Image: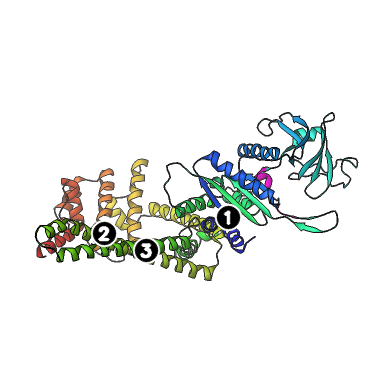
């Protein structure tokens, strides 16, 4: 196995699926097609070429239906090549969902599907029997007893009983990934002369776009030398190769692993322990984990950096071409007179516009390239300190988020049972009616979230209820956010049935009013948006220019 493939396998084990997918794609190991027949045909052709060159090659797929199709196509290659001999043994179907009718001949490759450790000395001189996953080639067929003699991949000769052949054997050209677990393609074998030879192990995997994290790990770790992925894409997809790699990485990031009850208990205990710590401590750990995970397990920032750099190069070339074109027209216009010069004005203007667009494209591409460089540098810096195990970081992040959610529920319960004075002043006491109590709680959470986000610490002595609850008004982005919060709380007060006189006093400058609140309340009442100060400033700048 090449060094890059070992690195990709490590990346997949650690949950960095996007990096693994990009590595296989960049080294020509991912084959894509919108036509399933062409894709599966190409896969079997590559498998056959590998076998004919002396490699130990195996076909894999996730579903049993795909394995049946692959086995049929592969066996046809073997048959056309004249590798099958003697009479046919037709084996009737057993459990239609599992084993369809099969036809075995000498030279066919079979796989054993169940353990049978005791076949008897007459059937198995080695006494080892066969196991689920044992591979072999048919040496002889007894059509009367319906028994099959198999030469296993480890060089033994065993005779399988008729009932075992019917119930527990199938073609061995293609395997499901589930059956392939524990299998190694390309093992060393000892010849009759005692010499040890190792055939190159090559795996061909169909339907890689549908593999989970666990199945993808099985797929890429079966062969000793190389693994090739075959991906079926949608006909209307126009994504680039980089987008296709991220899509493949997203699929390989999806875990289907079932947690044990003991693991669930340990996780619950850890969540409870973390919920007893401070929000700041949990927030710091969460930030560290997010930095380690970066853009996500499905994204390869190295590929994004390369794509951004390539786009920048293309933009620079296009800008230079546009600049040269505009220069030619400028020269022609300067050296022309009269009607000829007027006729050049249109093409010259169009060339200048193209140059302007090209320069904007260069600016955008340069910014994207710088952002990609910065993101990759930040990720590499964090991983140099914290390691590269994204899978463990994702599991830990789930626990930390659950602990934060537990803290959140406790805070909401406390706010509801012991509401602060500024909440009671603005929204009144908690209603007894369930529907209004829920709406009152939403308003309380809105107030507390706003106070935490901006760090409200003043305004407690203000006679204005809005200022006591939300702090004094401010300008800029925080001012606009505050106005949205006020609008939401106005809706809550209305749903709670607070007296209209409170709103009237607020609009008319009574005890509830402040400039920002008055603007929101006036807009809510009239349906007309009041003028926004920064828009007036922009308009004034336009007039001055």
Residue situated in front as seen by the camera: 187 or 378: 187
Could you tell which of marks 1 and 2 lies nearer the N-terminus? 1
Q: CA distance from mark 1 to mark 3?
A: 47 Å
Of badges 1 and 3, the one in the foreground is 3
Task: Please identify the quarter of the rendering in which residue 351 is found.
Answer: bottom left
Q: Which residues are magenta?
A: 174-187
Could you tell which of marks 1 and 3 lies nearer the N-terminus? 1
Task: Please identify the quarter of the rendering in which residue 496 is found.
Answer: top left
**Residue 474 shows in this picture:** no
Query: Residue 211: horizontal and vertical position, in percent?
Result: 57, 47
| Whether residue 462 is situated above or below residue 416 in the rendered picture | below
Of badges 1 and 2, the one in the foreground is 2
- Residue 267's disc is 1
Q: Label 2's element?
A: helix
> Are the residues at dot 1 and dot 3 in contact (C-beta closer than 8 Å)?
no
Query: Residue 200: horizontal and vertical position, in percent?
Result: 69, 55
Q: CA distance from mark 1 to mark 2?
A: 55 Å
Classify the position of the N terminus by image quarter.
bottom right
- Residue 357's disc is 2
> Residue 335 colored magenta?
no
Question: Dot 2, crowdedness within 10 Å: few (<14), some or many (≥20)?
Answer: some
Classify the position of the C terminus by image quarter.
bottom left
What residue is shown with label 3?
A: 312
């Amino acid at each position: 196995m090449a060094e890059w493939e070992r690195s990709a396998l490590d990346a997949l084990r650690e949950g960095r699926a996007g990096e693994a997918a990009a590595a296989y794609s960049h080294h020509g190991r991912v084959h894509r097609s919108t036509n399933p027949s062409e894709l599966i045909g190409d896969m079997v052709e590559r498998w056959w070429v590998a076998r004919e060159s002396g490699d130990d090659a195996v076909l894999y797929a996730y579903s049993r239906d795909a394995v049946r199709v692959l086995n049929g196509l592969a066996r046809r290659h073997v048959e056309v090549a004249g590798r099958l001999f003697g009479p046919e043994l037709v084996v009737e179907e057993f459990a239609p969902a599992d084993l369809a009718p099969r036809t075995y001949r000498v030279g066919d490759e079979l796989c054993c599907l169940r353990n049978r450790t005791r076949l008897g000395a007459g059937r198995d001189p080695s006494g080892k029997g066969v196991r689920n996953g044992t591979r072999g080639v048919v040496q002889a067929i007894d059509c009367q007893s319906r028994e099959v003699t198999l030469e296993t991949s480890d060089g033994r000769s065993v005779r399988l009983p008729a009932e075992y052949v019917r119930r527990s054997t199938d073609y061995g050209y293609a395997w499901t990934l589930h059956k392939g677990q524990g299998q190694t393609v390309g093992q060393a074998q000892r010849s009759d002369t005692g010499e040890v030879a190792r055939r190159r192990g090559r795996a061909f995997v169909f339907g890689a776009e549908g593999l989970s994290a666990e199945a993808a790990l099985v797929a890429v770790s079966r062969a000793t030398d190389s693994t090739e992925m075959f991906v079926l894409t949608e006909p209307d997809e126009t994504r680039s190769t980089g987008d296709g790699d991220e899509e493949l990485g997203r699929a390989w990031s999806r875990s289907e692993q079932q947690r044990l009850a003991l693991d669930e208990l340990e996780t619950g205990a850890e969540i409870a322990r973390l919920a007893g710590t401070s929000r700041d401590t949990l927030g710091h750990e969460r930030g560290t984990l997010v930095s380690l995970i970066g853009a996500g397990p499905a994204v390869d920032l190295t590929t994004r950096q390369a794509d951004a750099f390539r786009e920048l190069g293309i933009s620079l070339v296009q800008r230079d071409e546009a600049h040269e074109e505009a220069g030619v027209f400028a020269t022609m216009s300067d050296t022309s007179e009269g009607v000829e010069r007027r006729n050049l004005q249109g093409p010259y203007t169009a060339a200048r516009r193209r140059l302007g667009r090209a320069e904007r494209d260069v600016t955008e591409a340069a910014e994207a390239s710088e952002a990609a460089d910065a993101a990759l540098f930040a990720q590499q810096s964090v991983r140099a300190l914290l390691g590269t195990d994204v899978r463990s970081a994702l599991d830990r992040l789930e626990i930390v988020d659950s602990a934060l959610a537990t803290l959140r529920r406790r805070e909401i319960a406390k706010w509801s049972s012991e509401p602060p004075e500024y909440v009671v002043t603005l929204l009144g006491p908690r209603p007894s009616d369930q529907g209004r109590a829920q709406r009152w709680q939403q308003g309380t959470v809105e107030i507390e979230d706003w106070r935490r986000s901006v760090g409200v610490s003043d305004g407690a002595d203000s006679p204005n209820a809005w200022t006591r609850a939300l702090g004094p008004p401010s300008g800029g982005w925080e001012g606009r956010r505050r106005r949205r919060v006020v609008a939401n709380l106005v809706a809550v007060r209305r749903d709670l049935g607070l007296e209209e006189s409170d709103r009237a006093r607020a609009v008319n400058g009574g005890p509830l009013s402040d400039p920002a609140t008055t603007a929101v309340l006036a807009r809510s009442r009239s349906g007309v948006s009041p003028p926004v100060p920064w828009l007036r400033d922009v308009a004034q700048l336009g007039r001055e220019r």
